[in-house]
Amino acid sequence: MTNQHHKSKPVQGKTYSLFGINNDTEHYYNLIRKLTNDFLLKCPYEKKLLSHVQSAGGKSTLIKKLSVKQMDKPLMSFINKTLKATLSVYTPGVKSHLSKIPISQKLDPIIKTKEYQYHLYMIEIELINRIYKKDFKQSAYKFAMIAHCLRDFRPECKSVSGDYESICTGCTKDCFIHLGSTLLKKYDIHPYISVSMDLDKPFNKIQREHGSSGALGIACVPELAMGMRLCIKLGIPPIGIPLDANRCARWMKKTHESSFNIQELEKLIL
Ligand code: SF4
């Protein structure tokens, strides 16, 4: 494993923070793995559990909703109760945020994400990582889309245009985009800074030019879950790591420094 000692400092987001009440995000990742294992004891097929979790999480223009008959109501009731009891500590700002959404953002589905949806998305991301990791690794062209907000607070950012999205030139040693890009390149994953609102375009172009391709996303929880669904719809195996907190200008009035867990990223791509 690469010697990545860079640890994130605790940060609070507008609605969520993977630090919760801890000084690191390891507790979060360990809890998500344990909860997913517990749910798989009740529903042993990962893809079936994913369908239930996606249907219950909603915002499913991209996924086929399970009919009410197919929905395992006792399972989902157990999952929702368990998630509320265990994950609310990571989503302390949702209620207050939802009560103050300005009119200009009322139609933004990401901004309107409800607390139970954050919890379901957290499990969805873990399940998708487990299901698609092998296909991602076997893809002929592996690329990563890293949220641009990880660099926005740096007015001196020296990124340049790349084939599909912007590319980091590594101008600042401690920038999380640079740290992530350096690690990703070691594993033959092509890193891009995601700036397009409409990811269909770069994804379709990548598929046209490379055929078999796999995507790695680094974005806030609801954006990552939606991006992974889009990849699955387009036939691109996705994996991803959520940002430690949502702190960009879309959520807060201005962009604040954010981070992600580099050690978890390396575990995912090893
Ligand atoms: S290290 Fe990369 S992403 Fe970060 S500020 Fe420099 S060019 Fe921009």
Image (spheres, grey):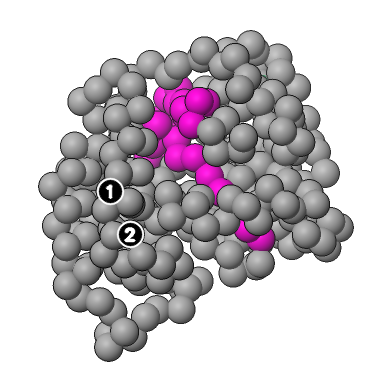
Q: Of helix, strand and loop, which one carries label 2?
A: helix
Contact, mark 2 vs mark 1 (Cβ under 8 Å)? no
Question: Label 1: which residue?
Answer: 35
Magenta range: 236-264
In the displayed orientation, state which residue is furthest to the bottom: 69
Residue 61 lies, with reference to residue 181, above or below; the image says: below
Viewed as shown, does residue 190 lie left or right of 72? right
In which quadrant is the N terminus drawn?
A: top right
What's the distance in space between the residues labelled 2 and 1, CA to CA?
9 Å
Instruction: List x then y, in percent, for residue 8.
Output: 43, 19
Q: Nearer the viewer, residue 7 or 118?
A: 7
Residue 40's disc is: 2
- Report if the beta carbon of the residue with label 2 is closer than 8 angstroms to ligand 1: no
Viewed as shown, does residue 158 lie left or right of 240? right
Residue 232 lies, with reference to residue 133, above or below; the image says: below
Query: Which residue sits at x=40%, y=71%?
Result: 48
Q: Earlier in the sequence, mark 2 or mark 1?
A: 1
Q: Is residue 28 visible?
A: yes
- The amino acid marked with disc number 2 is Leu
Query: Which residue sits at x=73%, y=46%?
Result: 142
Query: Which residue sits at x=17%, y=72%?
Result: 74
Classified by dominant secondary structure, the portion drawn in magenta counts as loop
Instruction: List x then y, in percent, for residue 50.
Output: 40, 65
Instruction: List x then y, in percent, for residue 123.
Output: 35, 52
Q: Residues within 10 Å of mark 1 (few under 14, many from 20)?
A: some
Q: Of helix, strand and loop, which one carries label 1?
A: helix
Residue 29: quarter of image: top left
Q: Is residue 35 magenta?
A: no
- The amino acid marked with disc number 1 is Leu
Residue 54 lies, with reference to residue 220, above or below; the image says: below
Q: Nearer the viewer, residue 111 or 240?
A: 240
Badge count = 2
